[in-house]
Image: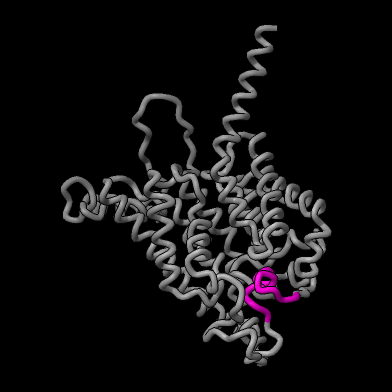
Amino acid sequence: MKAIKKYIDSKLKPQFEGEGKLHAFRSLFDGFYTFMYVPNDTAKVRGAHIHDAIDSKRIMSFVVIALLPCLLFGMYNVGFQHYLAIGEEASFITTFLYGCAAVLPKVVVSYVVGLGIEFTVAQWKKEEIQEGFLVSGMLIPLIVPINCPLWIIAVATAFAVIFAKEVFGGTGMNIFNVALVTRAFLFFSYPTMMSGDKVWVNGEYLDCINGTVDGVSAATPLGEIAAGNDVTTPFINTVTGLMPGSIGETSVIAIALGAIILLWSGVASWKTMLSVFVGGGVMAFIFKDSLAEIGNFQWWEHLTVGGFCFGAVFMATDPVTSARTETGKWIYGFLIGCVAMLVRTLNPGFPEGMMLAILLMNVFAPLIDYCVVQSNINKRAKRIKA
């Protein structure tokens, strides 16, 4: 590896720097170089700096690794739901490969479109490649149904990267979670692709009404509720994830594995993660009678269906768009859980709730931090006067 790095530093790198022949692609080269190797550059601005080999690219890499259990299980579940729908049995390998062939194009489209825009903007601004889309590019295909066309994913990804990220100044400056903006764009622009009246199998869309395929659920259990259908989903299915739903959101077990990785690596805040479940549980208990009428779910089962677990672990803990003060993390997460359950209770036409809850609290995260900091300042001022 040292020989390869030495060759790149001596032969390839000069071609992309200064007036080198390939200087027009400097940002592209820098992005791949800093992803493979820890850069030796030091901060040139005077002041205090934290010196650590774990830079933002490595942090984002941990999040991508944490998402792999959801991705792999989602691939298997896609194949499982497909063969279940057509009434055929298939081996584990066949099932997984079918799902892999269906999911991988969505991952490729997400990264090609998103990183393409990132590289173009970075080269235009003559800046380094920003690494935030390493995570967003993996999140986007995991939060969409398998029947979502590739061109729609491409359009939604481009919209989110440009209008939810680049216009704010890039990674670290955006106030909204990029992946959730993608989902919001899809939901409001192409609602039938996200939930409701189409059977969740790969391939041609099949009407739930004409009985082309018997015994197959709609896009998600919560999507069927929005369509006015009765739903009875065994609790064990909501935990294992062997049910219709967005690609990476169905399995609580896979999400839990990702949560362990995030918490072990210190990337995500356990305070934010836990408070989301506490807020959701408290609000679900308060409105348990109303929630019991929604899909025949118990109040505690609502914590395992839809995108609640996935949002709590991977979306609410986004270090850029979430609250950053320690007390603020508790408040921020608790309110996300509360709002998500309120949406499910008060708006049966949109029974998911998690997407809107996180996007809403993205707006209030700076205010929460401001209030927490100001409260600490006032307490210290009172102690000094005393």
In-image side of 243 versus 165 (left or right)? right
288 displayed left or right of 197: right
90 with respect to 156 (left or right): right
* Magenta region: 217-230
Q: Residue furthest top?
A: 386
Q: Position of residue 271 (x, y in %)?
A: 69, 42
Q: Position of residue 369 (x, y in %)?
A: 59, 33
Who is closer to the viewer here, 370 or 254? 370
- Residue 377: which quarter of the image? top right
Q: Quadrant of the N terminus?
A: bottom left
Note whether residue 258 is visible. no
Vertical relation: 105 (above or below) 293: below
Quadrant in the picture for residue 240:
bottom right
Can residue 221 be found in the magenta stretch?
yes
Please report the residue visible at 67 percent of the width from the left and 39 percent of the height from the top.
331
Residue at the image point whose x is 27% and y is 46% from the top: 125
Please give the count of numbered marks on the rendered protein.
Answer: 0
Is residue 107 found inside the magenta-colored segment of the image?
no
Residue at x 22%, y 48% (from the top left corner) = 17
Q: Residue 320: x and y, percent?
A: 51, 44
Residue located 64% across and 36% down the image: 328
Whether residue 184 is visible to the viewer of this picture, yes or no, is yes
How has the structure been colored for display?
A: one colour
Question: Which of the 4 image quarters holds residue 44?
Answer: top left
Give how far across and how far down residue 237 sits, in percent: 75, 72
Above/below status of 186 relative to 380:
below
Q: Quadrant of the C terminus?
A: top right
